[in-house]
Image: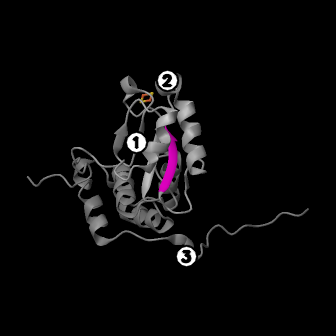
Amino acid sequence: MSWQTIDRTTVAEEQLGPGLSDAVRDKVRGFFPRYATKQAALLPALHITQNALGYVSLQAMRDIAELLELTPAQVLGVVSFYTHFWTHPKGRKTIVLCRSLSCELMGGKAVKDAIQRQLGIGEHETTPDGRYSYMTEECLAQCDDAPCMLINEKMHKRVRAEDVERLLADENNDKLDIPRSDLFDAPPEG
Ligand code: FES
């Protein structure tokens, strides 16, 4: 066997994905005054990008690096640290199941098994019809109502394994009672 050299500096055009629009760039710039350095705006920049594109593409990482005067490797380092950020496109709805202690103790594992059985996908995967993506995250701050899960931004509480089939079939399972404000809107002037 001989060593093989892999050139990681060239990426095929189709692997780069979409870049940042002017509107996204402006929104990220709107965060600069909140921090001592523009580099510190990296997390809001990633949230804004994922909200706009559905994920953080390689081109978006390059654009963010340029905008914040970081290296692409520094941006990738943060993206890959947080499970919240996706590096490939997601389905129309994202299920986020809590995997922390209270939910685990209250039957979260059975809910997880039911979701994976129902959808036939694992962590950070998407159903072939593009309807659902699935992932687990640490505590969703709703421990009183364990086990719980999000479908997009709608919180589902005290979910039982036997509820999963009905829940996933419900077209309105991501409808919010009260629309939330956009946390990543630029701060008001003055
Ligand atoms: S442990 Fe599941 S919401 Fe806190």
Q: Report which residue position mark 3 lands on.
A: 14
Q: Determine contact: label 3, label 1, CB under 8 Å.
A: no
Q: Report which residue position mark 2 lands on.
A: 106
Where is residue 159? Give x, y as percent: 44, 33
Residue furthest to the bottom in view is 13
Tell me the magenta residue range.
132-137
Q: Report which residue position mark 1 lands on.
A: 150
Q: CA distance from mark 2 to mark 3?
A: 44 Å
Q: Quadrant of ligand 1?
A: top left
> In front here: 190 or 20?
20
Q: Determine contact: label 2, label 1, CB under 8 Å.
A: no
Q: Is residue 133 magenta?
A: yes
Where is residue 27? Give x, y as percent: 26, 61
> In front here: 136 or 120?
120
Residue furthest to the right in view is 1
Q: CA distance from mark 3 to mark 1?
A: 31 Å
